[in-house]
Structure formats: C-alpha cells, structure tokens
Image (cartoon, rainbow, N blue to C red):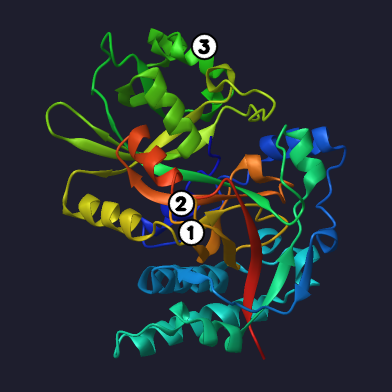
Amino acid sequence: MTFGLILFLYCTLYSCFLQAFHLDSTGTQFIAKRLGHYAPLEVGNFFEKKKFYLTTEQIITDPLALQQVAKDTLRYIKRHEATHIHTVDPVGFAAILSLQSVKNTLQFICQTVEEDKKTGRHRLLQQPFINKHFSSVAWRADTRAATYSNITLPDDNHIRLTTYAVFNMQGSRHKTEKYNCGLYALHDDTLAKRFTKQQIIAGALEHVSYLKKRTPLAWVTQQALEDALMHGTMLVAFPDDGSRLLNVHKNNGIAYDRSIKDRTEQRRYWFFKDIGTKTHEAASRIEKIKNRKDVIFAGDLHNIGFGKLIALRHENPQTRQLEMRLGILADTGSAFYNNLYQLDYFAGLAEGYDDLRHIIRQRPTFTKACILYKKG
C-alpha cells in the first residue's frame, strides 16, 4: 500500500510549483496523538553526517529526469523559502544540513547534467565522480514510529520503501451499475466536512439539495475510487474515447488512520480537481508524469525538508546486483507526518495494479537510505 499523493506532480502540471495542499493538519494531529507528541521529531537522533563511498554499486537514475526535477525544485525554493519554511528548511534538519547546501547540490546536478549532454557520458552514473563530489547524511530509521504503525523493519539501518503511481483507470461520465462511485469537485466548502467516504459512496451527495454544490467529474468503480484516494492523481478514460486527468484538491477533514489496513474502512474522502482533458496540453502533462518516474520520492517534508537528494542502497530483488538509486524528496502526504522510517517511490503512469505490481517486484521492501550533498 502506498501513501504518496503526488504533491509535486500537481504543480509541475501547471508549470508552477508546490502549493502544499497535502500538508494538512488532520493527518498531522492524528499521528502525532498516536506517537504521544505534537512537536517535530528530534531529527538528530536519526540523521548525522558521515563519509560516503561507493564500491561495487551500480548507480541507477535518469540524469535528464533528475536534472528537470532539480530545476523545478530550485524554482520552488526560490519562490517559497520564506513562506513555506516549515517544509523547505525545517529547523531540526537545518542544524544538520543547511538550505544553502541543498541549493548547491541541486545546482551542481543541473550543471553537471547540462555539461554531460554534449558528450552523452553522464558523470552522475560514475562511482568515482560521486565519491569525489558528494558527502552524505546517514539515515537511521525511527523504529518506534514504525512499530506504532505495525511495520517491522530489519533494523534501524533500513527504511521501508513503498511505491505510488498515477493510475490510468476506466470510468464513465454518468453513474452506471458498474461505475457507481463519484469523484466529485466541490463548489461549496460548507459541504466539505459533512460526510464520510462511506456516506458519499452510498449517495449522500446525490441529494437534490446538493446539485449546485458539487460536480461529479467521473464515475468509477469502488476499487478505482480507493486507488484514486490513495495515489492522488489519476487519468480516467471514458467509453467515448475522452479522458480527464484528476488530482485530489480538498478532503473531508477526517484523518487517514494507519491502524486500519482495509482501505474501504477508511473514512477520509478527497474531493478532486480537473487538471486536463484529452488535448495536446493534456498529452504534454501526461508526458511529464511519465518522465518524472523513478526520480521523485514522497516522504516526511516536515522533518527532512523539501529538495533533498536521496540515495538508496540495496540489492536489486530481481538481478541480485548491488545498486544505488538517486531521486529528490519532492512529495508528501499526511501518512508521512513524523514518519522517519519510510519513503514512497514514484513509478509514473501505471496501467492498473498488474503493471504496478510488476514495477514493485523490481524494488526492495527495505533499503538503506542517505541524503547526498555536494562537498565544499
């Protein structure tokens, strides 16, 4: 089960950037209460600077995609470092790694990839180059928080790795026997927190008194609805060959309960926003989604901070080869509040769960993780 909600993608689709619409207080209050505190974690207990050295690991990343995410990240930091300081430069992590170091690292990625376009030999994929130019912040997992969420880690040197995606799903423009769950846009905020997900599925918003207060953007199966609520962004294809690209917009104020394993029992519902139909512009947006796979992580922005260059080190479960994967922390969700034991890896556009399961089989369940930053 994945938790990322495509915060990064929502904004890159608009050629703007993060608007922090998933940094919601409901999820924050819920998990903080379970952990017994409301303040940010003492990140110094989980992160510390250490020497970094690659030996036989193969470096896995798409340098061009990584460069684009780095550019977008720098653009966002420049615009919002004063107003979104709690996720751009959290005070706890700032004592370990400065925001200037984060900026320098992202700028170095952009510069290096740009230079290497001329030769086609990307130095970010070469061990000697990484060893020479990067240091690291080691990550010890918060095993206590993992235990609260019924997650058993191998040890505190490994974090949990999950995967999320934009689902390409079938739907209808009208309610049918098969497609009987609505993905609603909300026009009246007074309606936002009135109903649970179960009540909405049962037809609460179909009452005549609410017709002008919401619009069903698409009708899907309950399985597709659950996928949409979990993954955040989805492409809905209609029988008439049209489609809509939808993203979560506002929720009903009910926290996601990590103690509930059956997704159908979760009471949270997200209202949606239409961010594209099947036009040239929509095709361009979908292409951006595809091109950002495997270089974006969702995680705890409140404690780690936006824009960190993440390196995962593990044995590939299929090839059995040692590898290091690079990506940038640029997404989050309420399930990641005070969650320093997990990252969610963005897989791009998935053609249903069979496709997603194929992707997941290529990734480990647990991995070692660290944050790389440019030396000097």
Name the amino acid, label 2: Phe
Q: Looking at the image, which is closer to me, 268 or 259?
A: 259
- Mark number for residue 346? 2
> Regarding mark 2 in the picture, which secondary structure is present there?
strand
Residue count near mark 1 (Cα–Cα under 10 Å), binned few <14, some 14–19, many ≥20: many
- Give the secondary structure at mark 3: helix
Q: Indicate the position of residue 365 as horizontal and vertical percent values.
A: 57, 45
Along the polypeptide, which appears first: circle 3 or circle 2? Answer: 3
Q: Are marks 1 and 3 in contact (CB under 8 Å)?
A: no
Q: What x and y, as percent, mark residue 370?
A: 66, 66
Q: Earlier in the sequence, mark 2 or mark 1?
A: 1
From the image, tell me which residue sits under label 3.
199
Q: Amino acid at mark 1?
A: Ile
- Tell me the element at label 1: strand
Instruction: Identify the residue at horizontal 44%, vertical 86% (top origin).
Output: 112
Q: Which quarter of the figure has residue 153?
A: top right
Q: Quadrant of the C terminus?
A: bottom right
Image point 59% across, 89% down: which residue? 132
Query: Given the current orientation, which residue lies at the most extreme front position?
Result: 320
In the drawing, what numbered circle is on residue 296?
1
Tell me, yes or no, whether the two marked residues, 2 and 1, touch with CB atoms within 8 Å: yes
Residue 48 can be seen in this image: yes
At label 2, counting other C-alpha atoms closer than 10 Å, the crowd grade (few under 14, some 14-19, many 20 or more) is many
Residue at the far right in the pictured view: 36
- Which mark is first along the chain, 3 or 1? 3
Determine whether, in the image, residue 372 is placed left or right of residue 296. right
